């Protein structure tokens, strides 16, 4: 067998080995697939909301009702601000950390880690909360239920029904 024939035979064998006998067709996205919902941490201090709740802001004015200062680099054409509020706790030392978000069956599920104080703390009412950014392109326009639960106990924290507006371009 000549060098060219040996090389051609080798290339065919290599191609078949790579396929492992099962051809996997390449499928291009259809354009109708919705992006995956992502949750991104944000450096924003939530306000002291006095009841358990979930709130989502789709513009800077609505976000200003949830946090002390809206970071200038938040692009509301790309993201929505989500905040989860635990309501009053009678001691200091409580915290909340939003960990992940998923969109399933027309509902957004926020997984959060609620942490109780490990030691006896000051008897002072606090209002633990945390905020993050959600990828706006992943959310369907219209009515959407958003709920939060604890990652460790699966205990329900709070929920809300929101109206997701159509995305607009940033000013």
Image (cartoon, grey):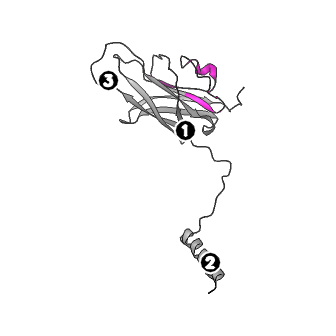
Query: Which residue is at a point 39% across and 16% down the rendered structure image?
Result: 126
Q: Nearer the viewer, mark 1 or mark 2?
A: 2
Q: CA distance from mark 1 to mark 3?
A: 29 Å
Q: Residues within 10 Å of mark 2 (few under 14, many from 20)?
A: few
Q: Position of residue 64 (x, y in %)?
A: 58, 18
- On residue 117, the disc is 3
Q: Secondary structure at mark 1?
A: loop
Q: Nearer the viewer, mark 3 or mark 2?
A: 2
Report the magenta residues as a range. Answer: 52-81
Q: Position of residue 135 (x, y in %)?
A: 59, 36
Residue named by callout 1: 38
- The quadrant the C terminus occupies is top right
For this rendering, which residue is in front, 50 or 75? 75
Q: CA distance from mark 1 to mark 2?
A: 47 Å
**Magenta span has 74?**
yes
Work out whether mark 3 precedes mark 2 in sequence or the reverse, and give the earlier one: 2
């Amino acid at each position: 067998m000549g060098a060219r024939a040996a090389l051609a035979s080798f290339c065919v064998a290599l191609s078949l080995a790579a396929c492992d006998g099962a051809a996997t067709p390449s499928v291009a996205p259809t354009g109708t697939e919705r992006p995956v919902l992502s949750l991104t941490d944000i450096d924003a201090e939530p306000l002291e909301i006095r009841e358990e709740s979930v709130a989502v802001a789709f513009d800077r004015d609505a976000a200003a009702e949830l946090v002390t200062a809206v970071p200038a680099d938040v692009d509301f054409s790309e993201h929505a601000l989500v905040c989860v509020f635990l309501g009053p706790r009678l001691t200091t030392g409580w915290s909340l950390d939003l960990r992940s978000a998923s969109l399933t069956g027309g509902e957004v599920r926020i997984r959060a880690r609620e942490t109780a104080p490990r030691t006896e703390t000051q008897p002072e009412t606090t209002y633990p909360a945390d905020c993050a950014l959600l990828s706006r392109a992943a959310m369907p326009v219209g009515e959407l239920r958003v709920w939060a639960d604890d990652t460790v106990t699966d205990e329900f924290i709070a929920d809300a029904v929101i109206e997701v507006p159509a995305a607009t371009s940033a000013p």
